[in-house]
Image: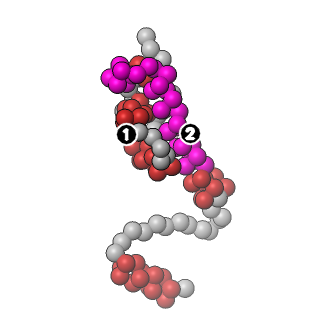
Amino acid sequence: MGRIKTRRLTAAQFAAAMVLITNMSPERRTAARLALVDGMTAEAVGTFYGWSRTAVNNAERVVWEAAERFRLAKAAEEGAGGKLPRGWGREVMTAPKPLLKQWKAQLADQE
């Protein structure tokens, strides 16, 4: 029986990590995604590409470390563990610019 995978990323986490990695070949990116996101074992990915398990693990490690750097940066951006002071809230809106301007004006009128 093989080892249980302990390093897993969502597709969004993987995509965020890829922004931080500029010098990884497309094959290594795909291999790391197969292992980290799709849950394939390093042995299975290595067999598919004709690589050693260590080569796949190295690709995984590079992406995993980038994902960790991204997570730490997001936590720093959000403050102490993402906690806001009492009475505060956070809203993120994505909309066409004219609507955003309209909503901002309405909020300003309410203050």
Q: Which residue is mark 2?
A: 65
Residue 26 sits in quarter = top left
Q: Residues within 10 Å of mark 2 (few under 14, many from 20)?
A: few
Residue at figure coordinates x 53%, y 33% from the top left: 61
Q: Which residues are magenta?
A: 45-72
The label nearer to you, 2 versus 1, is 1
Asked where in the image residue 98 lies, by quadrant, the reply is bottom left
Amino acid type at image mark 1? Pro
Q: Residue furthest bottom?
A: 109
The colour scheme applied to this rendered structure is secondary structure
Q: Which mark is residue 26?
A: 1
Residue type at mark 2 is Glu
- 48 shown above or below 103: above
- In this picture, residue 111 sits left or right of residue 49: right
Q: Residue 59, labelled with which disc?
A: none
First-in-chain label (2 vs 1):
1
Circle count: 2
Which residue appears at 60% of the width and 49% of the height? 72
Taking 90 as reference, is 44 left or right? left
Q: Label 2, label 1: how many angstroms apart (C-alpha)?
A: 18 Å
Can residue 32 be found in the magenta stretch? no
Horizontal and vertical percent position of residue 56: 45, 26
Task: Tell me if residue 75 can be seen.
Answer: yes
The spot of residue 54 in percent (x, y) is 49, 22
Q: Nearer the viewer, residue 63 or 77?
A: 63
